[in-house]
Amino acid sequence: MTTADPTAATGTGAEAPDACSAHSATGEHGYTKDKDAHLRRLRRIEGQIRGLQRMVDEDVYCIDILTQVSASTKALQSFALRLLEEHLRHCVAHAAQDGGAEMDAKVEEATAAIARLLRT
């Protein structure tokens, strides 16, 4: 599994801001407490993608492959929603407690992430 360029997701060419800059020094992000579960889930999704490669290599019927593509897509969407929820509960909530411009920036950041998810 390769790591995607963080600027590719935003399409701006600018480096993506840290998900929770106020807590980045400690490595604490919204997903930190469930990191192992997230990694297991991503490995499972990676296995689904490898399965798609095998299906194409073995000349499996198109509709069967498309069914698996749909399942893989839904798994990634589900993972993204969970990560977004954790971001809102942790990073945005902390920014809201602090108030001011950081809160506005976190809301804009989350809104942009939601917009990217809706485009997919």
Image: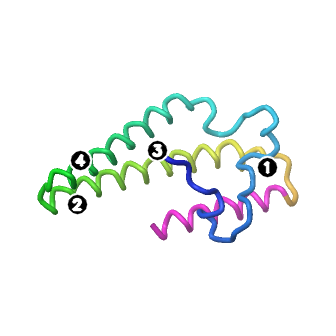
SS for dot 1: helix
SS for dot 2: helix
Dot 2 surroundings within 10 Å: few (below 14), some, or many (20 or more)?
A: few
Alpha carbons under labels 1 and 3: distance apart: 32 Å
At horizontal 86% and vertical 60% (from top left) the residue drawn is 101
Residue 106 rendering spot, x and y as whole percentages: 74, 57
Residue 54 badge? 4
Dot 4 surroundings within 10 Å: few (below 14), some, or many (20 or more)?
A: few
Alpha carbons under labels 2 and 4: distance apart: 13 Å
- Give the mark, 1 or 4, whose residue is nearer the N terminus: 4
In this rendering, would 41 be left or right of 20?
A: left
The quadrant where residue 109 appears:
bottom right
- Give the mark, 1 or 2, whose residue is nearer the N terminus: 2
Dot 1 surroundings within 10 Å: few (below 14), some, or many (20 or more)?
A: many
Query: Is label 2 in contact with label 4 (beta carbons under 8 Å)?
Result: no
Residue 66 badge? 2
Alpha carbons under labels 1 and 4: distance apart: 45 Å
The residue identified by callout 1 is 95
Main secondary structure type of the part rendered in magenta: helix
Q: Which residues are magenta?
A: 102-120
